[in-house]
Image: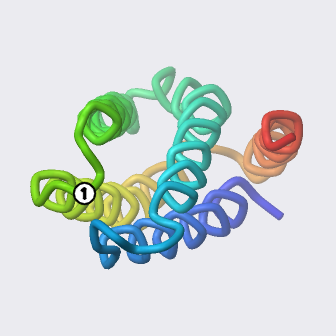
Amino acid sequence: MNIFEELRADHQKQRTLVKILAKTHGDSEGRQEIFEKLKHELQIHATAEERYFYIPLMKEELTQEKARHSIAEHHEMDELIEELEKTDMSSPHWVAVAKKLEEKVNHHLDEEEQEVFQLAGKALTEKEKEELAKSYRQSMAYRDR
């Protein structure tokens, strides 16, 4: 597998978790568990993705701007998660922030897959794509314990 295939597989997990979370209600059973799973998935993914995808892309003029933008979006998602952690889960504000997080996650993943991957495909060699995938996969396996 190459780095794009590895990232897409994790993106699908994130899309599913954030969709489920945004549909929960204050008294929904499992809301906390889903939130914790999503938070964990986003954190380990962002760390590995920045290290094994975006840092190499920052070295290339063609992809530098998109890589910086994507890292900034990771930070925006972190801020929304922090806001959710500080907010009472049963409040209407919590649901509103969860929906903002859903929009941000979906926007980020779509933009990454439709724009960043296209440029990265031109900037990286086939060997680099495979090596980055291997490093990314190992990092995710280590962090997912």
The coloring applied to the image is rainbow
Image quadrant holding the N terminus, namely: bottom right
* Res 75 → quadrant: top left
The correct choice, above or below, for 3 with respect to 63 in the image is below
Q: Position of residue 19 (x, y in %)?
A: 39, 75
Could you say whether the residue bearing mark 1 is in a helix, strand or loop? loop
Q: Position of residue 10 (x, y in %)?
A: 64, 61
Residue drawn at x 35%, y 33% as measured from the top left: 78
Residue drawn at x 38%, y 31% as measured from the top left: 71
* Res 92 → quadrant: bottom left
Describe residue 133's horizontal placement relative to residue 64 as left or right. right
In the picture of the structure, the residue carrying the numbered disc 1 is: 90
Q: Position of residue 120 (x, y in %)?
A: 51, 49
Compare residues 44 and 85 and report the one nearer the observer: 85
Compare residues 27 and 7 and report the one nearer the observer: 27
Describe residue 135's horizontal placement relative to residue 17 as left or right. right
The correct choice, above or below, for 55 with respect to 31 in the image is above
Q: Position of residue 60 (x, y in %)?
A: 47, 28
- How many marks the image carries: the answer is 1
* Res 85 → quadrant: top left
Compare residues 31 and 5 and report the one nearer the observer: 31
The correct choice, above or below, for 92 with respect to 13 in the image is above
The correct choice, above or below, for 112 with respect to 36 in the image is below
Residue drawn at x 28%, y 66% as measured from the top left: 26
Residue drawn at x 50%, y 75% as measured from the top left: 16
Image quadrant holding the C terminus, namely: top right
Q: Amino acid at mark 1?
A: Ser
Q: Label 1 crowding class (10 Å Cα cut-off): few <14, some 14-19, many 20+?
A: few
